[in-house]
Image (cartoon, grey):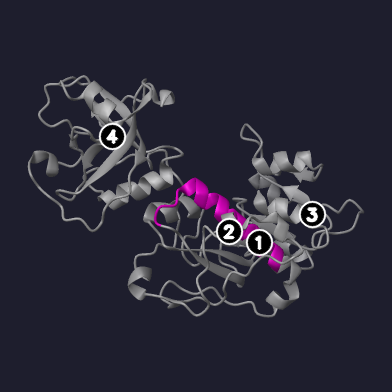
Amino acid sequence: MPVLQAMQAVPSIVSDISVVCPTDSPKPCAVKRFAERKEIQIFQPTSAELKTFELPCTTLGDPFDIAVVASYGNLIPEHIITKLPYGGINMHPSYLPYYRGPAPLIRQIEKGESLGGVSVMELHPHKFDMGKLFLQWAYRIPTDMLCKDFNVSCSHHGAHAVLRVLDRYNEYKETLFQQPTANDPIIIKEEIPQPDELYKHLFSSKVLDKLPTFKKGTSIPLETKAIRPTYARPLRTTDGNVNWNACTNLDIYNKWRAFGNKPGLFTYLTWPPNSQTVKRVKLLEIAPPDMHSTPVVRDDTDKIPGAISYNKGDNFVSIQTKEPGRKVKCTKIQFEYKNATDGEKFYNGYLAARPQKCPTFHDNGQYSGEGKENL
């Protein structure tokens, strides 16, 4: 969406636009709604129709020069690319070859990634995210940034990158370079410049500066690179579920940063106690973990993954992770069918007077799915 907004706002670089976007499912996407407001010509071919899709003309009846693709979800057929004088460019919101695929933003946050970036490449007719690179910028991802904020700042960097390539197309075309492989050392080739005077008014420096640039020539340590995935798999409805037996406190904090806004971070509780009924609980706010403290194991609540504990006077409940003595602090929580509350009220209202020596969150187990719309 910001890519289209930026292109539409600079007629000296982009004089005419038509939009090709997904079919409504069932509501129109944000790109289509924006195009409708701006009275931009819109096409919505299905995946099958795209294979024989014929390029439209400009409002003056001339052929278009180039295709600009961002988060479209379909391969652009070769017959379209070859008919365009300048082919096509694709903006991908990661530092390729890392996090190729359909969900790069949320997977970077889920992984606790520190290296982010924007890659603008040639369209490849047969593979996603595999073209030669026009431009590649790298920035630092703050360890406490939420995915919704990451999405905003990254999309601004992406729109800036697209405008820069379009404005300097011949310059960047002469220096096209192959994508590095996952085994290559990561050395930053180009710092992120300030937006040109022509379009600097389109971008908020406060938004861009939330993802600060790496300096040119910076080398990313190999031990950091070794665990970086090259594929960002599609989202699943279960991605927001917590497996207390498999996650550290940092894993859970990063899952909350990634999924806390949508679809949400969830766990499950047998309720009432000693029954066969499982209720879903939404963890609305997780405090950043203290990675430097020494874990303390005092009793079973410090050993059992998912065990819930509370200290009088706190506004949070502590939940044991897979590492004995290391817990996450949940400051805002919502029980199924109930209003959100802080940790103290949740503990006092549901657990304090119940005959459970060690109340424990667990995976979905026998959960029927009833009431999920109420969270």
Q: Quadrant of the C terminus?
A: top left
Q: Which residue is mark 3?
A: 55
Sequence-wise first label, 2 or 1: 1
Q: Which residue is mark 1?
A: 160
The spot of residue 216 in percent (x, y) is 53, 77
Q: Amino acid at mark 1?
A: His
Q: Which mark is residue 315?
A: 4
Task: For marks 1 and 3, give the one nearer the viewer.
Answer: 1
Q: Amino acid at mark 3?
A: Leu
Task: For marks 2 and 1, give the one nearer the viewer.
Answer: 2
Which residue sits furthest right?
A: 60
Q: Which mark is residue 208?
A: 2
Q: Is residue 313 above or below residue 200?
A: above
Q: Is residue 182 above or below residue 263?
A: below
Q: Is residue 5 above or below residue 222?
A: above
Query: Tag count in the figure?
Result: 4
Give the residue at x 65% y 41%: 30
Q: Is residue 147 magenta?
A: yes
